Image: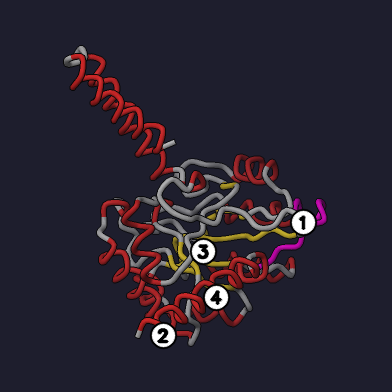
């Protein structure tokens, strides 16, 4: 989509050079359209406009990955852990480094329960797409170091705050060596005022083999309770009714990990050959 918009912009510029300037309203319309396409690419990471993004798992595996953002929180994360334990389900928690540092006991409880850990940035920068690749690398590294120091686990997945993926975000994640993970269905439970019924309805519609489900185990600023807390038992029941196992990203995306490891081996071999 971005390539089409770029080609259109080049064609418009060439037309202006050869035949004279286009009317101002046409130029402005083209500019607004181009910006709109670029912003869409940032806010809809599944389009992979600016880099590789994992948004679902294999279709031939009767399993889904539940993922939780914006924790850990001593107020709500333990309730999520209790619901998962009761259902015998495993999930992946994309944690904020600052919260993990403030509540290491909750972070360790997530790991002790057998769940996977991903990185959601250090402090949930809401204009994450504007950060330079170096800043993204530093942010991921800072959060990942907190997790590793407190749990001994080196987080292997990354979901940018607000799901924003710009060319800079993608470049920083590549430098950090972490795949960017989006989602195939989201509950929108991170918005104030959502109800458990609305969250269950949205998630249930998207429960298919290989789905990656985005929920929240905490509010970004701890100022309200995400509707997912009340909705989770019903979401887990819906998965069971559909015969879908609830697994971690590590299990669902084993092939992605294998491909990434192979790529690193090839890159390492190339570096050795040129040294």
Q: CA distance from mark 2 to mark 4?
A: 16 Å
Sequence-earlier tag: 4 or 3: 3
Res 64 quadrant in image: bottom right
Q: CA distance from mark 1 to mark 4?
A: 22 Å
Where is residue 168 drawn, in percent x and y?
Answer: 31, 56
User: In terms of depth relative to the viewer, which is nearer, 190 or 207?
Assistant: 207
Q: Report if the CB atoms under discs 1 and 4 are less than 8 Å apart.
A: no
Q: CA distance from mark 1 to mark 3?
A: 33 Å
Q: CA distance from mark 4 to mark 3?
A: 35 Å
Mark sitting on residue 76 = 3
Sequence-earlier tag: 1 or 3: 1
Q: Which is in the foreground here, disc 1 or disc 3?
A: 1
> What residue sits right under mark 1 in the picture?
60
Sequence-earlier tag: 1 or 4: 1
Where is residue 22 drawn, in percent x and y?
Answer: 21, 15
Q: Is residue 92 magenta?
A: no
Q: Residues within 10 Å of mark 4 (few under 14, many from 20)?
A: few
Sequence-earlier tag: 1 or 2: 1
User: In terms of depth relative to the viewer, which is nearer, 230 or 166?
Assistant: 166
In the structure shown, which secondary structural element does the residue marked by tag 3 occupy? loop
Q: Report if the CB atoms under discs 1 and 2 are less than 8 Å apart.
A: no
Chain part drawn in magenta: 237-247
Q: CA distance from mark 3 to mark 2?
A: 48 Å
Residue 239 vs 113, above or below: the answer is: above
> What residue sits right under mark 2 in the picture?
272
Q: Which is in the foreground here, disc 2 or disc 4?
A: 2
Q: Residues within 10 Å of mark 2 (few under 14, many from 20)?
A: few
Sequence-earlier tag: 2 or 4: 4
């Amino acid at each position: 989509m971005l390539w089409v918009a770029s080609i259109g912009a080049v064609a418009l510029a060439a037309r202006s050079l050869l035949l004279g300037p286009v009317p101002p309203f046409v130029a402005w319309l083209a500019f607004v359209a181009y910006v709109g396409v670029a912003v869409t690419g940032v806010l809809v990471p599944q389009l992979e406009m600016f880099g590789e993004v994992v948004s679902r798992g294999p279709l031939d595996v009767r399993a889904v990955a539940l993922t939780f953002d914006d924790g850990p929180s001593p107020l709500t994360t333990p309730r999520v852990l209790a619901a998962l334990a009761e259902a015998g389900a495993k999930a992946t928690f994309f944690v904020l480094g600052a919260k993990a540092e403030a509540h290491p006991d909750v972070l360790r409880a997530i790991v002790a329960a057998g769940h996977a850990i991903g990185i959601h940035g250090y402090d949930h920068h809401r204009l994450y797409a504007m950060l330079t690749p170096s800043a993204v690398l530093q942010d991921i590294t800072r959060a990942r170091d907190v997790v590793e120091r407190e749990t001994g686990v080196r987080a292997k997945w990354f979901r940018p705050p607000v799901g924003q993926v710009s060319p800079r975000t993608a470049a920083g994640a590549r430098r950090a060596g972490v795949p960017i993970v989006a989602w195939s269905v989201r509950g929108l439970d991170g918005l104030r005022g959502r109800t458990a019924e609305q969250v269950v309805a949205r998630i249930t519609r998207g429960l298919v083999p290989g789905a990656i489900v985005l929920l929240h185990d905490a509010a970004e600023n701890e100022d309200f309770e995400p509707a997912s807390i009340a909705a989770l038992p019903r979401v887990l029941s819906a998965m069971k009714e559909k015969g879908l196992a609830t697994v971690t990203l590590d299990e669902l995306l084993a092939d992605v990990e294998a491909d990434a490891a192979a790529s690193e081996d090839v890159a390492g071999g190339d570096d050795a050959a040129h040294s």
